[in-house]
Image: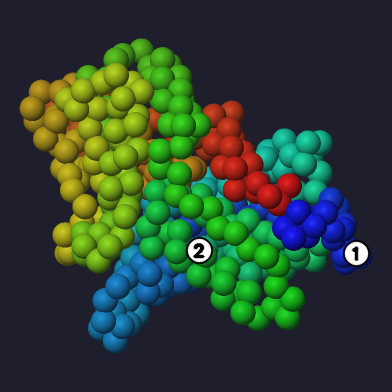
Amino acid sequence: MRDEISTLEAPDTGRDDRHSKVGVLLINLGTPDATSYWPMRRYLKEFLSDQRVIETNRYLWWFLLNVIILTNRPRRSGEAYASIWNKELDESPLRTITRSQAKLISASFAEKLPNVVVDWAMRYGTPSIAEKLDVLTSAGCDKILLFPLYPQYASATVATANDKAFDALKKMRRQPAIRTVPSYEADPVYISSLVTSMKKSMADLDWEPEVVLASFHGLPKEYVDKGDPYQEQCKVTYECMRAALGWDETRFKLTFQSRFGPAEWLQPYTDKTIEQLARDGVKNIAVIAPGFAADCVETLEELAVEAAEIFHENGGENFAALPCLNDSPEGLDVIEAVVMRELQGWI
């Protein structure tokens, strides 16, 4: 009976999947539209109002956010963004790079996968995820791959991006089929690209780092205690890189940056580690940020400027913040490899 069933012709549904379009939506964290007070305030309010980002009493947080934080922080954050702003295009580097990633991946797919449509969106700010889902469905995409550009999973990054997409889907009469990209912390292409990019950047220095830090964005320890796998996945990426480099833990260290508020965050802290290394007599260090798919304020200002100042103020001499994968050939290799893997069965 099974053999008989397998030989039956599939019913004619009138649909030719060979000509069905598949959408790929690259999603990054977000960016303000300008560095002045009100655009910064709008961006920070959307970001810091996200319950995936700030898991605390909502009434207490509403007061702290709207009465205290949003009074002063937009100016300070605006100054940080202004120092790294792409003045030619009047936008943040994150917007510039993410757009370029989507454009270059789209061009790469143009001939070999002409039915795949690639676009990009931001979780906070513009262009919004809902807006770009409308663009993709209007272009005829009845299948869409959501690709939050975070190699390591955190509920405050990957989950909230997917949440926003699902919120948009709730309002659609005709929903596309949806897939989401899982974490790829140990993906061989990702690890190889990180190491290759890192070696290229270090080769451009006229000095050799004694220590290199792999600095990942921090997360409140409480989130990990609740079950978030982020810390362990960061360790996996770090260990894979260390094995590929053939370095020991003295030369290549794992740290976490960008902590906010009084709560304990994942340790060791990047800034404290840099300070201690300088005090211990280390004169030359470099920092790489493997968890960021594109350079942004956390890498271009927090690491390249603030961390460098900490190092120099405590006796260090040479400091380099190595670039993220961005839209480099290595960075595009990672995005394309993950997309091709996750589109299997759809293309």
Q: Left or right of 279: which side holds 169?
A: right
Where is residue 251 shown, x and y percent of the image? Answer: 21, 23
On screen, residue 49 above or below 104: below
Q: Nearer the viewer, residue 110 or 203?
A: 110
Disc 1 and disc 2 in contact, CB within 8 angstroms: no
Q: Left or right of 26: which side holds 66?
A: left
Q: Left or right of 242: which side holds 25?
A: right
Q: Nearer the viewer, residue 158 or 306?
A: 158
What type is the residue that disc 2 sits on?
Answer: Ala
Mark identifier at residue 346: none
Mark identifier at residue 12: 1
Q: How many marks?
A: 2
**Sequence-first tag of 1 and 2:** 1
Where is residue 161 shown, x and y percent of the image? Answer: 50, 63
At label 1, counting other C-alpha atoms closer than 10 Å, the crowd grade (few under 14, some 14-19, many 20 or more) is few
Q: Nearer the viewer, mark 1 or mark 2?
A: 1
Where is residue 219 shown, x and y percent of the image? Answer: 28, 57
Name the residue: 65% across, 81% down.
171
Name the residue: 74% across, 76% down.
174
Outermost residue, front side: 1
**Figure coloring:** rainbow
Q: Left or right of 34: which side holds 50?
A: left
On screen, residue 148 above or below 253: below
Outermost residue, bottom side: 59
Q: Which quadrant is the N terminus positioned in?
A: bottom right
At label 2, counting other C-alpha atoms closer than 10 Å, the crowd grade (few under 14, some 14-19, many 20 or more) is many
Query: Residue 235 occupies which quadrant of the picture?
Result: top left
In three-dimensional space, the C-alpha distance between marks 1 and 2, rounded to whole angstroms, equals 37 Å
Mark 2, residue position: 161
Q: Nearer the viewer, residue 115 or 292?
A: 115
Q: Secondary structure at mark 2?
A: helix
